[in-house]
Image (tube, rainbow, N blue to C red):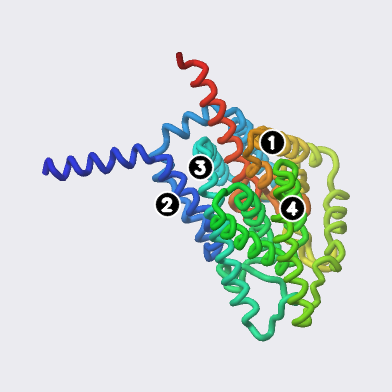
Amino acid sequence: MNRWQGKAGEALNCCWKARDVLLAGALGLWVAGFWVAEDGWHHQRLLWLVFPFVLFSADRIVGVVSAVRWLWLVALLLGWQSLSRCWADPPVVPQGGISDSIFVFVLAAALVATGRKKELGEWIVGGLAMLGAAVIVYSLVKFYGDPTRALGGPRLRNMLVYEDGLNAVLTGMLCAAGAVAGTWFSLSVEKKAHQRLWLMVLVTLVFGLMASQSRGPMLGLMAGLAVICFFHGRPCIRVGFWIGGAVGLYFLLTWWIGGSADSVARGSTGRIAIYQWFLERMSGTELIFGRGFGADGSIPENELGWFVHHPHSSYLTQLILGGALGLALLLAILGWSWRDAWRQAKQGECLWVALLSCGMGTLMVDGAEIFTIHSVPRLEWFMVVFPATLAVGRAYGQRTTARTQVESP
């Protein structure tokens, strides 16, 4: 018995020492669900598997909650969203509910705690990019393996999510974020073999983005690449040739197969009409306080000629549901995290500001609620909150290290 107690104690002690790594692994596996989970319902239920690791690292998480004021602002936004449900008439969806807000805040705090250590954040992001490349290869084969589909015609979908595949725009979002990460890693690793591996990942994800024909994510990718080029300079030219090669290969194959490649020719796809419809109906107290989170954010088919599930802009969604006050809180949170990420970039870590710029740029013309795990598109949290928390955590980790060095004799 004593021998078994001794081994159990040693194992528990090892787990305690490695609790940061265990928490990062659990969070990384859950975030990977955006790429591979069958649907949103299953993905949300998998959160319960993360919480034992959250409890195991509770001392770390409580520490960052008490020290990182950015999280206080997040709590204020989540509280406002939950409060606004009081005047939502009626609250028909779970966005902004108490349980939703708790989940989002705990995830944010756990990721800030994880982001303190540079290698853990990079490990999660790098693993997701590699996973994404594998998923895109599988999806290209399965989706276009159907003889009724041709490259440049039907838009690529992630075939691991939902029975008919993940929406093309959301597939494009995943590809854009992965491509930004792939670009940064291909410029940051030193070994030639690792560089070639990351270039393969990058080319695959850029090709997948082009096949999805999703222009919002393309805008986000350009924003992320612009940030990386600003900080890395001339070495980006070599990577740019690979990106250009992936784009050229897509158009060449599309022309050879006989597809349409109309990713630019689709016009605004109704965005302007959607935005105008919502803005024309906002005035008075609704403009200040919003409709309330949980309220219906769709447009009936008889209004525009087609059914609109959500406003197709995360910032407009925040204004509609949370009012000017909610939008101001959101912009303050994003601005704070972007400032921290920019400071990290000045010290040689531009991954975080590049990912955050990609997400913020993409959600200008796509997406719905950001600080929720229950939005219709589902990926807003992944595109913005995920990199924002890692950036804030990294900034906090550096401040803590600097303070310790100053205080040490």
Q: CA distance from mark 2 to mark 1?
A: 33 Å
Q: Residue at x 74, y 55 (%)?
A: 366
Within-10-Å neighbours for mark 4: few <14, some 14–19, many 20+ = few
Q: Measure how far apart labels 1 and 3 are at the Cα level.
A: 18 Å
- Residue at 52% of width from left, 49% of height from top? 124
Picture coordinates of residue 128, whole percent (x, y): 55, 55
State the residue at coordinates (59%, 70%). Answer: 137
Q: SS for tag 1?
A: helix
Q: State if disc 3 and disc 2 touch (CB < 8 Å).
A: no
Q: Which residue is mark 2?
A: 49
Q: CA distance from mark 2 to mark 3?
A: 23 Å
Q: Distance of mark 4 from mark 3, alpha carbons?
A: 26 Å
From the image, tell me which residue sits under label 1. 342
Q: Nearer the viewer, mark 4 or mark 3?
A: 4
Mark positioned earlier in the residue sequence (4 or 3): 3
Q: Mark 1 Cα within 10 Å, few/some/many (few <14, many 20+)?
A: many
Q: Which mark is residue 119?
A: 3
Quadrant hosting residue 290? top right
The answer to whether residue 321 shows anywhere in this view is no
